[in-house]
Image: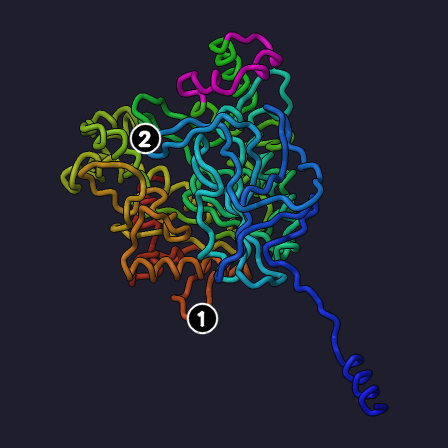
């Protein structure tokens, strides 16, 4: 009996108390707990509210909550109306949500990548499927931010008007700084990355005092920070503009007053009381406020001027364009509509006395159609010229890696039907980073996609995209072909300046 009692005591003493493992689907944020979805490859948390904001007011951190909030469905889109290429709509101003995707196994100290989606009038963070990218060992955050008239509207008496989308992005980045560690990320290693309007926004954040310290690296895909607009370049009938992205605050306020009259309002109280649907009914009101305003606390000076003066935050940058950026804009404005541009007249309207010289450099007979000729002129003059200048300026302060996405057989994922050679069109690189259901990639394109994701995540991890098994990517430096061309089975440095005739455009 004594032996049995001793054995029982021994066994009792050796037994370990049952310990419940943490639920990987539940994360405790600074504001409260959220429950996401766990799969074999990822953890996905959707529709996390990061801020609240009254109309045309600065965003405020979301109040704390009790209990566990479900984070298994996307949050509301910010107010928007559909377009032929993006049939989305929303009239919900309570829309400042974000989504977090991580590898399946919880970890710590992972690089964090914050995605700022493109198009300043439509879109949302959850449209970008970050699961494959996160599986490379990073934490990916995709965000909603205010768009169009709710972002860039200006009016006398509105503090920092014309910058609300930028303010939302900064508030989302502050949320990331507070909460990255809870999702396994490193709050001191954050990469802001975006495409088109999202890249443009990052160009603004580089010179915004409020964004300093909120991110340590930047990836800008087809950004427009330094881009101007010759006449008829983006949309037929639109005159030349000195900047695509930035306008003085006084000018934005004057445009706001004009639209206020259309809405039947003479003061801010009236404008703020209007139903969202009534505002969205005004033709072109979303597109009229896609530029951000400068001359305020958020953007004290034009980000283009700031970049040229060296007033931007120094950090590693990965930035580039697609080989045929402007074909999509020309194709949508002409070929999809069943018309063809009058090439010589467009050159004359855009470039005046230089039109004949440009026609000789870009003879229409060299191209498949007048559309391709006009698109090539604008790709070189607008996109390549400004991006080349941007990268050279930023490389004076920190490492810069330039690229050109050159897959001219990239699938068209937008609902655009036309017998048109889209080439490596604007945003054609997007499905190679974020898979698109409507963009079926060939095996060779899938391999390129994997290589690009590796470059992007390597850069987020160390500030250098190079890594084992990848073709070498040289840094931008004067006098060398330092732009990396990205195409299936053909990743190599190219002379970007020569390819786009930049000496001619000087």
Place of residue 195 in the rendered image (x, y in percent of width and height, measured from the top left): 44, 43
Mark 1 nearby-residue class (10 Å; few <14, some 14–19, many ≥20): few
Place of residue 240 in the rendered image (x, y in percent of width and height, measured from the top left): 37, 25
Q: Quadrant of the N terminus?
A: bottom right
Q: Quadrant of the C terminus?
A: top left
Above or below residue 459? Residue 341 is: above
Above or below residue 51? Residue 142 is: below
Left of 148 or right of it: where is 333?
A: left
Which secondary structure lies at badge 1? loop
* Residue 84, numbered label: 2
Residue drawn at point x = 57 percent, y = 54 percent: 112
Above or below residue 28? Residue 6 is: below
Residue drawn at point x = 56 percent, y = 23 percent: 249
Query: Which numbered disc flags the more N-terminal residue, 1 or 2?
Result: 2
- Classify residue 158 by image quadrant: top right
Whether the magenta-drawn stretch holds residue 287 is answered as: no
Which secondary structure lies at badge 2? loop
Residue drawn at point x = 67 percent, y = 37 percent: 61
Q: Which residue is mark 1?
A: 468
Place of residue 149 in the rendered image (x, y in percent of width and height, measured from the top left): 50, 24
Which range is magenta? 264-285
Whether the magenta-drawn stretch holds residue 276 is answered as: yes
């Amino acid at each position: 009996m004594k032996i049995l009692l001793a054995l029982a005591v021994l066994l009792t003493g050796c037994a370990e108390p049952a310990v419940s493992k943490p639920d990987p689907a539940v994360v405790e944020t600074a504001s409260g707990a959220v429950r996401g979805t766990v799969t074999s490859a990822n953890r996905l948390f959707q529709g996390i509210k990061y801020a609240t904001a009254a109309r045309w007011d600065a965003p405020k951190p979301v109040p704390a909550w009790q209990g566990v909030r479900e984070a298994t469905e996307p949050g509301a889109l910010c107010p928007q109306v559909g377009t032929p290429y993006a049939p989305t709509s929303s009239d919900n101003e309570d829309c400042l949500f974000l989504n977090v995707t991580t590898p399946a196994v919880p970890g710590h100290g992972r690089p964090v990548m914050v995605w700022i989606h493109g198009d300043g009038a439509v879109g949302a963070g959850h449209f970008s499927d970050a699961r494959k990218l996160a599986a490379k060992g990073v934490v990916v955050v995709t965000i909603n931010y205010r768009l169009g008239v709710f972002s860039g509207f200006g009016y006398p008496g509105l503090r920092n008007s014309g910058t609300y989308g930028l303010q939302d992005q900064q508030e989302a980045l502050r949320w990331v700084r507070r909460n990255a560690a809870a999702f396994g990320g490193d709050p001191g290693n954050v990469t802001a990355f975006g495409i088109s309007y999202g890249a443009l926004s990052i160009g603004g954040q580089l010179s915004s005092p409020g964004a300093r310290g909120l991110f340590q690296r930047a990836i800008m895909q087809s950004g427009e920070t330094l881009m101007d607009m010759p006449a008829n370049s983006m949309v037929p009938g639109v005159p030349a503009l000195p900047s695509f992205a930035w306008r003085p605050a006084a000018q934005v306020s004057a445009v706001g007053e004009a639209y206020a009259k259309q809405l039947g309002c003479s003061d801010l109280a009236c404008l703020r009381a209007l139903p969202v649907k009534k505002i969205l009914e005004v033709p072109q009101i979303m597109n009229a406020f896609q530029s951000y305003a400068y001359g305020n606390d958020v953007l004290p000076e034009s980000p283009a001027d700031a970049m040229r003066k060296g007033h931007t935050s120094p950090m590693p940058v990965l930035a580039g364009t697609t080989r045929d950026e402007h074909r999509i804009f020309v194709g949508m404005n002409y070929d999809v509509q069943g018309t063809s541009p009058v090439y010589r007249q467009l050159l004359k309207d855009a470039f005046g006395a230089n039109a004949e010289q440009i026609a000789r450099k870009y003879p229409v007979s060299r191209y498949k159609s007048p559309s391709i000729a006009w698109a090539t002129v604008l790709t070189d003059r607008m996109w390549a010229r400004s991006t080349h200048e941007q990268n050279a300026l930023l490389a004076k302060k920190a490492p810069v890696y330039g690229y050109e996405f050159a897959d001219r057989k990239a699938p068209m994922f937008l609902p655009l039907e036309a017998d048109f050679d889209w080439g490596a069109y604007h945003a054609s690189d997007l499905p190679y980073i974020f898979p698109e259901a409507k963009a079926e990639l060939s095996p060779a394109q899938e391999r390129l996609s994997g290589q690009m994701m590796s470059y992007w995540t390597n850069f987020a991890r160390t500030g250098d995209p190079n890594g084992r098994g990848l073709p070498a990517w040289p840094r931008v430096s004067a006098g060398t072909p330092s732009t990396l061309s990205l195409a299936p089975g053909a990743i190599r440095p190219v002379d970007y300046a020569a390819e786009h005739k930049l000496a001619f455009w000087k």
